[in-house]
Image (cartoon, rainbow, N blue to C red):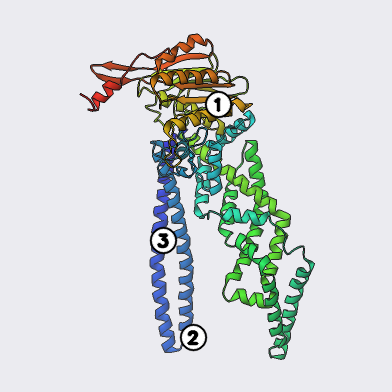
Amino acid sequence: MLSPSEYYNNQKRHFTGLLDKATKTANAISTLRLWTAIGFVITAIWAFRSGGGTHWWGAILFLAAFLVLVRIHQRLSEQCELYKLHLSILNNELKALDGDFSSFADGAQFVDIAHPYSYDLDIFGKGSIYQMLCRTVTIDGARMLADRLSSIARSREIITGRQEVIAELGALPGLQQNFRVAGSLEPEEPKSRERLEEWLRGDERFINNKLIIAITILMPLVSLACITYSIIIGDANPLLGLIIIVNWTLLGVLQKRIKPTISQIGNAEPFIDKTEQLLKEVASNEFKAAWLQRSATDAKSSLAHIARFKSHIKLFESRDNVFLGPALNSLFLFDLYCLLRLEAWRRKHKTVLLDAMDSITSLDVYISCAVYAFNNPANIYPQVTTAGTEIKAKDLRHPLLASATAIGNDVSLGRQEQFYLLTGANMTGKSTFIRTVGVSNVLCSIGVPLPAAEVSMPILDMYTSMRITDSVQDDISYFRAELNRIKGIMDTVRASPHPFLILLDEPLRGTNSTDKQQGTRSIVETLLTFHAVGIVATHDTGLCDMESNYPGKVSNYYFESKVEQNALSFDFKLRKGGSTSNNATILMRQMGIIN
């Protein structure tokens, strides 16, 4: 089986060859098109001067050839753009394999400093978990991915179902790429789906009104009769003017009902096109996972209905033609005719389109996760447990760290102890380890494989306190902000029926050492009374006596730094026990802060 790098490079060579061939053909067609245009001009001038019919036929043939070549060149240009889009995706994935995710959306709009864990764990923003995962091609897919990263699934069935879908899609890189290309061809306006969904769920303004139906049938028939009579007698029927006045009066009276539909589905065709293309990608595949099978079946059955809906929208949008629209409305009440057809379709098939849009949104998220799974074949899917609160892992690493250099650690939190009391000097790896455990809980919830040799995760809600932000505008000090955060943790966990994973990094750092030690001790003691497991990282080694004071509930772990000839080294390995090392003075001396 090819590695991700080999696959992407093979695909890159393939599409580069196709692009080169299409570009050369397009250039040749362009040259030939120029010569046919010159030929048309020459033969047209010759025919005009000579007045010969044969010469005019030559000009017509040159013109026909020119128009055919224009169409061929247009198609080749579209193919070239398609191949360029493939190559852009492939190049970005090759960069992602080297840890460069800068080409992808970072989800900065979803950053929320008050969220229970996302801000502390770098879920959103530059260099975030979201940026590592996001390959979405729809606005709602991007939102759904953010929602899944912001909430922990509380069902083993949900998580294992997600794993099943991601595992199958992760083995289909061709589908991943084609889906992303199809979703990138059509631009999507921010409110396009919202407006369309509002119309689909809206009231029937016309189809239930028998008078409007009767008028929409009767007036065009009267117009046709008048037009036919005018043709027969060879003179305009004066009644036509009256019909036009009546029709525009009716349309004016009904404008308040017509305008909402125009605003809701006007220019909806690009969004429908995009949905249709994405459904075709789903429908063209055979799947094993139950959710994917249902999605493919629904996609196949919905395509005909959506194509019909598109034809109704195209017909309705022809009203925007400055000549055709007024003429059709003047004689045939075209707006009402189109709206009746649209509402008739909506009455029968609106759930088809609504379900299709929801399916595409979910699949968009799954494709993002599947790309990550494909790019990281050594990762494993965690076993999800429902009994107990033990987090068990071997060689667990942070997914944002390069696999070649990342240091993994074993975890057995919740089996022999309720809380880790984690000590260690600066830069030894405490914060990274805490974030690794927290991020693993999030990624397990959304169903993606983790960088580890073995992982078993229970279903745990999560609350963290690591990165506190004060607010001058709200007159909140750093210490007050931290207390508010800890109070939020206590209140939430105390009231919740669900078990929690609590992660605290250097709590109460905004106060003096004595106060900090007493306060941290009280926090841990309170947390021990909750249905929770967690890690509390601190520099205060005086708290290590809690292991003996609370046997079976608190265990000491630490990260070490070594000092050799006034130089520091770190192995970033978790050890049992309490830390005794300090390195702040050495670090400041190395940086030239002190002598």
CB within 8 Å, label 2 to label 3: no
Q: Disc 3 marks which amino acid?
A: Ala
Looking at the image, which residue is at 67% across and 77% down? 248
Looking at the image, which residue is at 34% across and 15% down? 581
Give the percent coordinates (x, y) of residue 180.
Answer: 51, 47
Q: Would you place residue 359 above or below residue 290 in this image?
A: below
Q: Would you place residue 7 above or below residue 16 in this image?
A: above
Which residue was labeled with disc 1?
490
Residue 25 is marked as none
Q: Nearer the viewer, residue 296 or 15?
A: 296
- Residue lying farthest to the front in this orientation: 475
Looking at the image, which residue is at 41% across and 84% down? 46
The quarter of the displayed image where residue 444 is located: top right
Which residue was labeled with disc 3?
26
Which SS class for mark 2?
helix
Give the percent coordinates (x, y) of residue 440.
Answer: 50, 28
Between marks 2 and 1 in the image, the one whose residue lies nearer the viewer: 1
Q: Disc 2 marks which amino acid?
A: Gly
Which SS class for mark 1?
helix
Between marks 2 and 3 in the image, the one whose residue lies nearer the viewer: 3
Graded by Cα atoms within 10 Å as few (under 14), some (14 to 19) or many (20 or more), the crowding at tag 3 reads: many
The quarter of the displayed image where residue 263 is located: bottom right
Graded by Cα atoms within 10 Å as few (under 14), some (14 to 19) or many (20 or more), the crowding at tag 1 reads: some
Which residue was labeled with disc 2?
53
Q: Earlier in the sequence, mark 2 or mark 3?
A: 3
Which SS class for mark 3?
helix
Q: Earlier in the sequence, mark 2 or mark 1?
A: 2
Q: Disc 1 marks which amino acid?
A: Met
Quadrant of the snapshot with the C terminus = top left
Q: Nearer the viewer, residue 130 or 162?
A: 130
